[in-house]
Image (cartoon, rainbow, N blue to C red):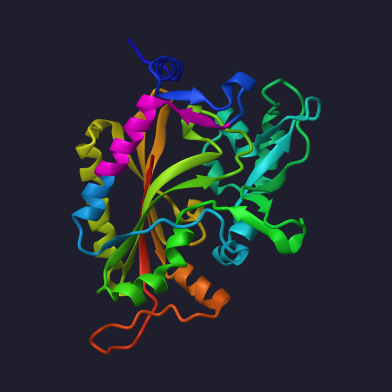
Amino acid sequence: MSVTLEDIVSLAKRRGFIYQGSEIYGGLAGTYDYGPLGAVLKRNIVNAWLKYFVDSWDDMYQIDTAILMNPKVWQASGHVDTFHDPLIEDVKTKKRYRLDHLLEDAGVKNTASMSLEQMIDTIKQKGIKSPEGNDLGNPAKFNLLFKTSIGSVEDETSTVYLRGETAQGMFVNFKNIVDSFYPDLPFGIAQVGRNFRNEISPRDFIFRVREFEIMEFEYFVHPDDWEKNFEKWRLDMHKWFELIGLPKEKIKEVEVPKEDRAHYSKRTIDFHFEFPHGFDEIAGLAYRTDFDLSQHQKFSGKNLEYRPKDGSDPFIPHVIEPTFGL
């Protein structure tokens, strides 16, 4: 007997794992609340992750950074200018959808590598309609950062963003960790935290939502050592999957091609698990080079170079980033 996603959603609610957010008011798309058993399960996963990756390592430093950050952080990281999804509107109902999702639902492959113009051409060639069967309007790019204001006056100077990833909180604290502890390379900064992305069309239960938690490291290495550290983390991630009971045969690695990788990545592997709705990403491993620290050094004016204890020339470390969905 096959298990469907609907079966899992129903069981999760009945047993007190996950509820629809704001359910008595009709819910809010892309939001879910964890019930008593769901909260315990999450806590157990986090504790096991911290014990395995942080407490047992001498070179790992856990931090807990603010959700609201100086908006210049997101300008430096590229999120303000590049953190977009393609948006398209049903001309009749005015409902908005992610253009790449409509293409994927119609059987189109490799949408991540398609430009907006290529997506538009494909929509026209295949005569793709909205889920309601209506014509679609002109697409546009939609920024995924949640924007809000601080203070009593709403203007451009009060704009801040809910963080779109935990990574930037670790990058901007790199200098603090080095100044406080002066660790040898390689070393890592770890964080478990909540992230926010203004998804156009949340779907697949808790797999694509607007508010979610991840467990993540930024592992700082010498530029010459990135490949061996990348491989070490790849193997350690598989050991973690085995530790928490994920069957090996249900996990596959996906080497992300250059055209599909994030702007900061020189190599990325996605780890996919076979769910009832198909294979979906549960973790990722990225080589972010020195992109983030270099950007923050440029935008902040602060020196973020690492000075080796042997007196050799300072340099900006490169970063290996293992990320785990929670």
Q: What stretch is highlighted in magenta?
A: 30-48
Q: Residue furthest right?
A: 92
Q: Which residue is drawn at 31% across and 63% down?
A: 188
Q: Can residue 265 be seen in the rendering of this structure?
A: no
Provide residue 320's location: percent of width, then percent of height.
Answer: 35, 61
Provide residue 115's location: percent of width, then percent of height.
Answer: 63, 49
- Is residue 250 highlighted in magenta? no
Q: Residue at x 77, y 59 (%)?
A: 155
Q: Residue furthest top?
A: 1
6, 281: nearer the viewer: 6
Q: Can residue 142 be seen in the rendering of this structure?
A: yes
Quadrant that contains the C terminus: top left
Q: Residue furthest front?
A: 152
- Does 8 sit left or right of 111 as displayed? left
Provide residue 38's location: percent of width, then percent of height.
Answer: 38, 28
Provide residue 303's location: percent of width, then percent of height.
Answer: 46, 81
Q: Residue at x 44, y 15 (%)?
A: 10
58, 263: nearer the viewer: 58
- Is residue 45 highlighted in magenta? yes
The answer to which quarter of the image holds residue 40 is: top left
Q: Main secondary structure of the magenta part?
A: helix
Total marks placed: 0
Quadrant that contains the N terminus: top left
- Does 90 sit left or right of 79 as displayed? right
129, 48: nearer the viewer: 48
Q: Residue at x 28, y 64 (%)?
A: 227
Q: Is residue 251 above or below residue 167?
A: above
The answer to which quarter of the image holds residue 88 is: top right
